Amino acid sequence: YASISTGDDGVRRLMFEEEGSMKVLHHRPIWPPDKYQIRGESSELLTWEDPENKHKLALTMEIKSATFELYQVLLAARRVLPVPGPKSIGKTSEAVTMFRPGMRETWAKELMQEDVVWGLVHAFRHAEDEE
């Protein structure tokens, strides 16, 4: 089983437990989005390297779509801005206009990520269709 938890230190962690015994197989911090990659013809393999211990890890799930869903959750877990979309564009706009000066570089990097750009395009198209 895969889950995300927040430790006493406030750090969000990815945890894998063995089915049946619930033995903890992996319990490490969630790394920045650029550390994770989705591979395979149908996005069935999630890979990453732990920057602290340099272990290379790979994960595949029984249900192929679950691997991609976990990948999306990992990307969102480290995100500062909400991913824009027709229903969340207001929250994204508010977050951008209310940023703290020390967050400018982080937010600029997030705004350049492909999923954010496509989320903005989708939100703008949806808004145009509503007019």
Image: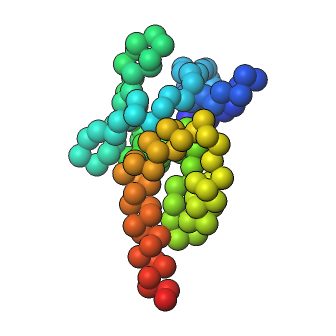
For the point 44% across and 82% down, which residue is it?
128
Q: Is residue 82 above or below residue 46?
A: below
Q: Nearer the viewer, residue 61 or 41?
A: 41
Residue located at (36% from left, 30% from top): 47
Instruction: Give the colouring mode of the picture.
Output: rainbow
Counting from the top left corner in percent of width and height, residue 10 is at: 71, 28
Q: Quadrant of residue 54?
A: top left
- Label count reads 0
Residue 25 or residue 115, whichever sits in front: 115
Q: Is residue 83 above or below residue 71?
A: below
Q: Position of residue 130 (x, y in %)?
A: 50, 86
Residue 15 visible, this orientation: no
Q: Is residue 34 left or right of residue 91?
A: left
Foreground pick, 29 / 16: 29
- Vertical placement of residue 5 versus 72, above or below: above
The residue lying at 44 percent from left, 73 percent from top is 124
* Location of residue 120 in the rendering, given as x and y in whole percent from the top left corner: 44, 63
As drawn, 34 above or below 9: below
Farthest residue to the left: give it: 41
Q: Residue at position x 40%, y 14% from top?
A: 55
Most extreme residue toward the top is: 53
Q: Residue furthest bottom?
A: 131
Q: Is residue 13 visible?
A: yes
